[in-house]
Image (spheres, rainbow, N blue to C red):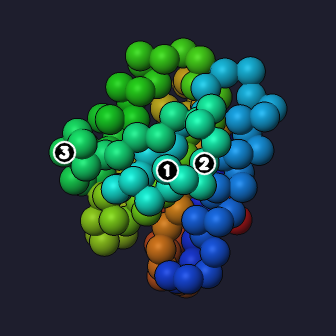
């Protein structure tokens, strides 16, 4: 299952993500992972969550992000929740590429039984219609 927290900059997306991650760590029987560009969340997340800075691994497109997330799921069967903060900062502003990424990611989430929550910095009206078929917008 994929969920998106959508909104313009300053609307509280990251705060909602932090609350979700810290809550998921308390209830998860496995690993909770957060992927972000940079290391802005390091002081806000419990140390029980795994925080990964994609800049360390040179991830700079939606295809690379998909490959990175696939590798995480393949290497750790204990991941129950995987979050991505700043999805457009990592993958780029191409909305059609975002739809394709989410389509592929939804299959991965279902097959690996991982809940995925992503933040997307844009107005909900800017999202293409195809996104609603692969992700829940919250």
Q: Mark 3 vs mark 1: which is more N-terminal? A: 1
Quadrant where the C terminus sits is: bottom right
**Residue ID at (41%, 27%):** 72
Q: Can you give x and y, in whole percent of width and height, for residue 57 in the image?
A: 23, 39
The residue that label 3 is drawn on is: 58
Q: Can you give x and y, in whole percent of width and height, for residue 14 in the image?
A: 58, 65
Q: Mark 2 vs mark 3: which is more N-terminal? A: 2
Quadrant where the N terminus sits is: top right
Where is 129 relative to 74, above or below?
A: below
**What is the spatial separation of the Cα atoms under label 2 and label 1, in whole angstroms?**
6 Å
**Residue ID at (54%, 53%):** 43
Of tags 2 and 3, which is closer to the observer?
Answer: 2
Name the secondary structure under disc 1: loop
Q: Is residue 113 visible?
A: no
Where is 128 relative to 135, above or below?
A: below
The residue that label 1 is drawn on is: 42
Q: Which mark is residue 45?
A: 2
Image side of residue 63 versus residue 74, left or right: left
Name the secondary structure under disc 2: loop
Image side of residue 50 versus residue 26, left or right: left
Q: Is residue 128 visible?
A: yes
The front one of 12 and 127 is 12
Where is 13 relative to 91, above or below?
A: below
């Amino acid at each position: 299952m994929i969920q998106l927290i959508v909104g313009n900059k300053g609307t509280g997306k990251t705060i909602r993500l932090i609350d979700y991650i810290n809550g998921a760590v308390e209830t998860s029987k496995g690993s909770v992972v957060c992927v972000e560009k940079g290391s802005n969340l390091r002081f806000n997340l419990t140390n029980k969550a795994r925080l990964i800075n994609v800049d360390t691994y040179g991830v700079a497109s939606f295809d690379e992000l998909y490959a990175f997330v696939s590798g995480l799921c393949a290497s750790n069967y204990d991941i129950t929740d995987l979050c991505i903060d700043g999805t457009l900062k990592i993958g780029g502003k191409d909305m059609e590429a975002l739809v394709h990424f989410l389509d592929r990611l939804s299959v991965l989430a279902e097959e690996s039984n991982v809940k995925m929550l992503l933040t997307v910095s844009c107005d909900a009206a800017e999202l293409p219609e195809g996104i609603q078929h692969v992700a829940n917008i919250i």
